[in-house]
């Protein structure tokens, strides 16, 4: 048998072995704690600035337009640990108040660049022990992950029944995992967007794949890359200043061992909101909603408020002849020009297919179908032609606009103004069965809409001889 070790040496070896075990345990514990450090818990991602929705995008990509502002987001219990029965155990994030500051700019009428900077102004929560692991709560204000975006419009115009765009969003890891404002790594989300307007109904949708380099689990819930979907509908006033309606969005993880579309890995949320243009370039919004199910990031209640400055916003009228300021009688349509009518240049002449207004003198009150008094002379000339030509049995009165502003609103305003012209002629003795009216909006331009001179030509009333 080997000689017995001295007692002191055996004691030293025992201490070293014990220290090694404790160090290994500490390293393992630390690694476990780090793997469970917080993540970007806030599921609310605002639409790019300039949208008339909170999450989905109205795709107002007009040349030279842009927006800047802030969206305030207050969530109650967005991160809660539940037991197997569905009862609440811990609220790791009980309150979270975030302001999203950002802006967007549109280049060449198709490319939009966007920026969003979230800051958690206030947070609180309680610690939890799950499967023997201590989870720390949110306790302090913190920056979130800065979001950059680029979208390209491929189809349609804002205000038409369908417009379509593709793009990408990227998040930089500028927040803090310890305060649940960051994943600690970059995220990337290619996306497709669609929106449209049909009369007073507006709609929008978004579909994205969110790549997350993290595919671990947190307190038994899988993180990882996700499929994100959002949709919203709304009703708007005729002038386009107010949009009111619901939105729904959800995300479901499909990597890291997640159960795709499972209730635990699919946080969903709804809210009902309104946006109102207080001034032509100042838009305010408010909304209320909450989570559906127990997915991480879906709060019990969420309140929303926004304030944005929208540059390059279209006027809330698009003239078939708005009168923004006094003009001399021969200046004609909004932006139109011409010389004073003379005996050699009558106010209206008849051709084979039209009654042509030589000096476009029709005027309407701003954002209204009310004819101004200066219009009487040219309408009297049209009436005289109808009186002198009984063979004209059907005259179609069409209102036309340029492409500035909301397409659906322009359609409605041009129709109402054409109807006002029809009503004037009927009121002055022309049989109603000889007349009909319609609004064509910006669908039939006769010149470019890229210059003021071209837009002025497109804003017109046309008297077509049908038979």
Image (cartoon, rainbow, N blue to C red):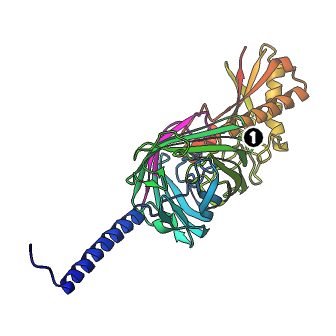
**Is residue 22 positioned above or below 104 on the image?**
below
153 is within the stretch colored magenta: yes
Residue 230 locus on image (x, y percent): 57, 42
- Specify whether residue 212 is in view: yes
The residue depicted at 30 percent of the width and 69 percent of the height is: 24
Does the stretch in magenta take in 187? no
Specify the quadrant that holds the N terminus: bottom left
Residue matched to label 1: 361
**If the image is split into quadrants, where does the C terminus sit?**
top right
The answer to whether 103 is drawn above or below residue 379 in the figure is below
Residue under the point 62% across and 43% down:
248
- The spot of residue 96 in percent (x, y) is 61, 64
Specify the quadrant of the image occupied by residue 99. Answer: bottom right
The residue carrying pointer 1 sits among few (fewer than 14), some (14 to 19) or many (20 or more) residues within 10 Å by Cα, namely many
- The chief SS type of the magenta part is strand
**What is the number of callouts on the image?**
1
Asked if residue 64 lies left or right of residue 285, the reply is left
Residue at the extreme front of the image, as rendered: 1
Residue in the foreground of this view, choosing between 366 and 256: 256
For residue 333, side relative to residue 9 (left or right): right
Residue 338 is at least partly visible in this image: no
Q: Position of residue 146 (x, y in %)?
A: 47, 62
Provide the residue span drawn in magenta.
Answer: 150-172
Helix, strand or loop for disc 1: loop
Instruction: Name the spot of residue 236 as percent of width and height, x first.
Output: 73, 42
Residue at x 40%, y 53% (from the top left corner): 216
Q: Quadrant of residue 201?
A: top right
The residue sitting at 84% across, 21% down in the picture is 387
Nearest to the observer: residue 430 or residue 204: 204
């Amino acid at each position: 048998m080997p000689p017995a070790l001295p007692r002191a040496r055996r004691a030293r070896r025992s201490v070293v072995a014990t220290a090694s075990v404790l160090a290994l345990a500490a390293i393992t514990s630390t690694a476990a704690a780090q793997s469970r450090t917080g993540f970007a818990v806030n599921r609310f991602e605002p639409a790019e600035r300039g949208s008339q929705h909170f999450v989905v995008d109205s795709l107002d990509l007009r040349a030279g337009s842009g927006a800047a502002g802030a969206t305030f987001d207050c969530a109650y219990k967005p991160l809660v640990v539940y037991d197997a029965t569905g009862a609440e155990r811990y609220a790791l994030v009980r309150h979270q108040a975030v302001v999203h500051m950002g802006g967007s700019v549109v280049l060449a009428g198709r490319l939009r660049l966007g920026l969003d900077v979230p800051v958690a102004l206030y947070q609180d929560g309680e610690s939890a022990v799950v499967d023997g692991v201590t989870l720390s709560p949110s306790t302090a204000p913190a920056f979130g992950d800065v979001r950059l975006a680029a979208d390209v419009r491929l189809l349609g115009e804002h205000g038409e029944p369908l417009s379509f765009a593709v793009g990408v969003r990227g998040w930089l890891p500028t927040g803090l995992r310890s305060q649940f404002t960051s994943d600690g790594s970059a995220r990337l989300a290619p996306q497709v967007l669609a929106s449209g307007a049909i009369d007073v109904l507006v709609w929008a949708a978004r579909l994205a794949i969110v790549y997350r380099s993290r595919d671990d689990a947190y307190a038994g819930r899988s993180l990882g890359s996700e499929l994100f979907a959002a949709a919203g509908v709304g009703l708007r006033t005729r002038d386009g200043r107010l949009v009111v309606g619901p939105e729904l969005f959800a995300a479901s993880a499909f990597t890291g061992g997640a159960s795709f579309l499972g209730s635990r890995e699919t946080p969903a949320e709804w809210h009902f909101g309104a946006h109102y243009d207080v001034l032509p370039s100042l838009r305010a919004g408010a909304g209320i909603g909450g989570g559906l199910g127990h997915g991480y990031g879906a709060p019990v209640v969420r309140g929303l408020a926004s304030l944005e400055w929208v540059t390059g916003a279209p006027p809330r009228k698009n003239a078939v002849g708005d009168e923004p300021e006094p003009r001399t009688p021969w200046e004609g349509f909004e932006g139109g020009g011409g010389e004073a009518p003379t005996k050699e240049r009558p106010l209206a002449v008849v051709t084979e297919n039209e009654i042509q207004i030589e000096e476009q003198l029709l005027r309407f009150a701003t954002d209204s179908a009310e004819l101004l008094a200066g219009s009487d002379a040219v309408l009297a000339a049209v009436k005289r032609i109808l009186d002198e030509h009984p063979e004209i049995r059907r005259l179609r009165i069409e209102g036309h606009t340029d492409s500035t502003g909301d397409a659906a609103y322009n359609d409605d305003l041009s129709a109402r103004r054409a109807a006002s012209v029809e009503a004037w002629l009927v009121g002055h003795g022309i049989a109603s069965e000889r007349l009909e009216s319609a609004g064509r909006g910006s669908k039939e331009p006769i010149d470019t809409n890229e210059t003021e001179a071209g837009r002025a030509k497109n804003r017109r009333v046309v008297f077509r001889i049908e038979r």
